[in-house]
Amino acid sequence: MGERNLSNGQKINVEGTELYYEYVAMSDSSPTVVFESGYGWALDNWQSIRKEVSTFANVFFYDREGIGKSNNSHKPKHSLQIVENLRNLLKAADIKPPYILVGHSFGGVNVRLYASRYPEEVTGLILIDSVHEDQNNEMVPLFTKEVKNEYLGQFLVESSLNEFEESLEQVRGSKLKNIPLIVLTGGTQPHHTSESFDAWMRFQIDLSYLTKTSKHIVVKEAGHAIHIDRPKPVINAIREMVEMITYKS
């Protein structure tokens, strides 16, 4: 096992915009786990699992454009652009594939799109209470009026509502080769009505059918941010994926 390199983070210019990332290298032979945050969240939201995951895998965290310590630009904030930004950042930082991609919420759309566009670079996929392309059409109308207004009013921090919906269309119909997949879903989400939560669970099951090698785990005592509410199941899922990939190689 190689000596761990605990990085304090740095910025790299990616096509005219400085993006901030942090990388912890455990071993040359260990896969790199790349974390893609939820909408508007900086990389420090992974603090609850970072230390333990970095004991058994190389880990890469970053802030998307305009979030956290990364600079902003006039480029679109939809998933296609986000995927290209991330890929160019990984190249510039000399973090070589293959990667295990971990996406929370909106980050789930981004990692799915990355894996469909660059399947040769992705060896595993973990979706944490991931956004689904049909949610705005089928789930949001089932919210209470208050929650619906809060949901639709959130799109001021990063992408606009239009760009978010562009992202949903960009991932629609995207194909995943038989990449190992783990889908985690929070089982306690009081902002939902019973009808909207039924739709959410249906979407989560649908995501678990994206590949033939998949597993769906419902974390009953966790909300939308499973990695914060109940870190252990997320850590265990990443460990399982790392061990599966390492064993196969």
Image (tube, grey):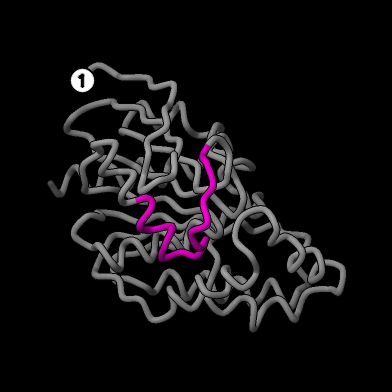
Q: Where is residue 58 in the image (x, y as percent from the top left)?
A: 31, 33
Q: In this view, does 228 lie to the left or right of 242?
A: right
The picture quadrant where one finds residue 193 is bottom right
Q: Is residue 112 above or below residue 21?
A: below
80 is within the stretch colored magenta = yes
The residue sitting at the top extreme is 3
Q: Is residue 228 above or below residue 163?
A: above
Q: Is residue 97 left or right of residue 192?
A: left
The picture quadrant where one finds residue 197 is bottom right
The residue that appears at 41% across and 47% down in the rendered structure is: 237
Q: Say if residue 231 shows up in the picture.
A: no
The residue that appears at 52% across and 57% down in the rendered structure is: 74
- Amino acid on which disc 1 is placed: Gly
Q: Where is residue 243 in the image (x, y as percent from the top left)?
A: 26, 42
29 is within the stretch colored magenta = no
Residue underneath mark 1: 2
Does dot 1 land on a helix, a strand or a loop?
A: loop
Name the one closer to the observer, 23 or 222.
23
Residue range of the region highlighted in magenta in the rendering: 70-86
The residue that appears at 51% across and 51% down in the rendered structure is: 73
Q: In this view, does 200 lie to the left or right of 63?
A: right
